[in-house]
Image (cartoon, rainbow, N blue to C red):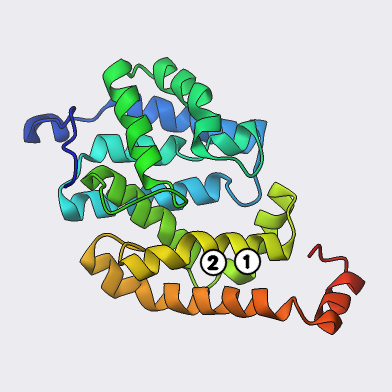
Amino acid sequence: MPKNSRTLPSARDRARPDSRIDELESAIRKLYTSVKDLPFHGWHHIYFVKKKAEQFARERGANPLLVTVASLVHDLNYMVRPNSAPEAGRQLRQEYLANAGFERPDIDRVEEIISEAHTATRTQRISPEGAALSDADTLFKALPMTPVVFSHLYLAENGIGLRDLAEKIVKEQLPLMEEGIYFYDPTVRERYFPWAQANMRLWQEIMASLDDPDIAGLLSEVNVKI
């Protein structure tokens, strides 16, 4: 059963602008664009996930404030350590949230949302806020252009080889497809699951192709790490 948000605001409160959001977004954007620009998990990724997560939150009645906040800070672990899990960014997230004026209950709830939306560990049990963030982040992975435009940036950012990435994608995402929770919202699933299926098939074929020594040799010739 989904968990209820402990800080769900009233309809009147939702209509009020929250200066904390603007302050947090400004600080996070500055971090990504001025301090450290990550080629895959950079501001372009954060902004896309934020916009889609906000849309999905509105469509399913999730807490929009918490979804926006979680989307802005969900990948700060990559600022701390390449190829890391969300826990690596916990302290950095808490610093940015506290500096923007968020108090402990909201900070703790944002941590819960990020944790339950994490691709490698998410389950059937998820809150509306976690589902909105998860569906938005997963959509970025499933975009038809992601393997072509962004995957080599993931390899460069995290210092891993093509086989490592293919195995990670298939190992983490295929079980979610089989369990019916690749996307949580039925409307999102209907809209985007064909993209996800095509993406999964591509990575399965990439993983299989790397066992061919001639293909491995070809990639070695053009300095692609396998």
**Closer to the camera in the image, 55 or 103:** 103
* Callout 2: SS: helix
On the image, the x and y values in percent for residue 151 come to 64, 63
Extreme right residue here?
Answer: 221
Which quadrant holds the C terminus? bottom right
On the image, the x and y values in percent for residue 70 come to 37, 37
- Looking at the image, is 88 positioned above or below residue 100? below
On the image, the x and y values in percent for residue 166 come to 63, 66
**Closer to the camera in the image, 108 or 56:** 108
**Closer to the camera in the image, 76 or 217:** 217
User: Which label is found at residue 170?
Assistant: 2
* Amino acid type, label 2: Val
Q: Quadrant of residue 183?
A: bottom left
How many other residues sit within 10 Å of disc 2, few (<14), some (14-19) or many (≥20)?
Answer: some
* Callout 1: SS: helix
Task: Say whether residue 150 is visible.
Answer: no
The residue drawn where x is 36% and y is 63% is 182
Q: Are marks 1 and 2 in contact (CB under 8 Å)?
A: yes
* Amino acid type, label 1: Ala
Q: Quadrant of residue 24?
A: top left
User: Which label is found at residue 166?
Assistant: 1
- Looking at the image, is 153 positioned above or below residue 158? below
On the image, the x and y values in percent for residue 170 come to 54, 66
User: Which label is found at residue 147?
Assistant: none
**Closer to the camera in the image, 28 or 168:** 168
How many other residues sit within 10 Å of disc 1, few (<14), some (14-19) or many (≥20)?
Answer: some
The residue drawn where x is 51% and y is 74% is 199
How far apart are labels 1 and 2 at the CA level?
6 Å
The residue drawn where x is 45% and y is 39% is 74
- Looking at the image, is 40 positioned above or below residue 174? above
